[in-house]
Amino acid sequence: MTEILLYRTSKVKNKGLKDIMAIEDMNGEVRFLTQLPYPNNLSKPLLELVECLLQMLLLWDPALRGGGLDPETNKPHCFTAMHSILNMKVMHVLDMTSAQLHSMILGTEESLHSLQIRLETQTQAHIPPLSQELLQESGMSLDPRWPPAQCLPDGLCGWDSFIVFLFDKSLTKYSGPLTARRLPDSVNFIVRETKTQLRLLSGRSGGKQSATYVV
C-alpha cells in the first residue's frame, strides 16, 4: 500500500499549472489533462468555464489557489466564476433534422424570435424561423409571448439539462444525414485494438463508456 501511495505521489508532482486531472490510459500510462475528458455531462458553453474554475481551485501555490482576490468582492475569483456559472441560462435544442444538439446561452429577456434567428445560423439545414417548431418534452410549443429563459427550471434542479426539440415544419420526412456522436477514447481503443487484452481497470472503464454511448 505504501509503495502504491509513493508511486501516485511521484506522478502527481508532474502536474502542470493548468492540469486539472490525471488519467491512466489504455496502455497503463498516466497522463495529465488540462481539459475534462469526453464524455462528460457538461454542455459546451459551460465546459470551458468549469475547466477554468477547476484550474483555479487546483493550483499548487496556496496563495494563488482560488484565482486570487477579486477587488470588487474581496473574495477569491473562484467564487465569482462559480456564481456566473450557476446563473447561466442554457437551453439545449435537439435538431431533429440532423440529430445535432445545440446548447444556447439565453439572455434573461431574450425573445423567442431572437433565439430562432440564432438557431437558423447554427443548424445544419439553416432552418428559417417561420419553419421552426420548438417543442418541450411535454409536447407543448414554446410560447412566443414569453422569453424562453422563463421555461428553464429554477435553482439547481434540472440545471444544464433542459431540452427542447426543433422540427422543420416545411418537411414531412426527415432523411438526414444524421450526425453521429464522437466515440470516447477508450471505446475507440477497443474498436481499433481488437486483439489487445486490457487490464481490469481499463476494461471496466471502456465497458462503462461503451454502455453509456449505446444508451
Image (spheres, rainbow, N blue to C red):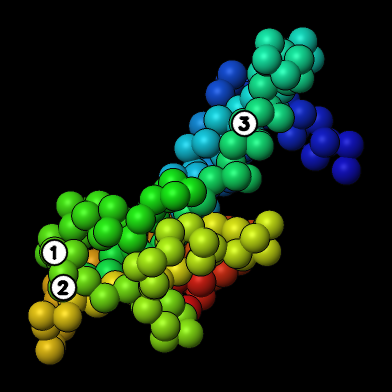
Q: Which residue is mark 2?
A: 131
- As measured in the structure, the alpha-carbon distance from the residue carrying label 3 to the one carrying label 2 is 38 Å
Quarter holding residue 72: top right
Image coordinates of residue 129 in percent, x first then y, are 18, 64
Q: Which mark is residue 81?
A: 3
Q: Which residue is at a point 54% across and 57% down the rendered structure image? A: 160
Q: Nearer the viewer, mark 3 or mark 1?
A: 1
Image coordinates of residue 35 in percent, x first then y, are 50, 37
Circle 1 Cα neighbour tier, 10 Å, few/some/many (<14 / 14–19 / ≥20): some
Q: Which residue is mark 1?
A: 128
What is the secondary structure assignment of the residue under circle 1?
A: loop
Q: Is residue 152 above or below residue 28?
A: below
Q: Which residue is at a point 46% across and 80% down the rendered structure image? A: 137
Q: Look at the image and tell me whether residue 205 can be seen.
A: no
Q: Is residue 143 above or below residue 80?
A: below
Image coordinates of residue 161 in percent, x first then y, are 53, 64
- As measured in the structure, the alpha-carbon distance from the residue carrying label 3 to the one carrying label 1 is 35 Å
Specify the amino acid type for callout 3: Ala
Specify the amino acid type for callout 1: Pro
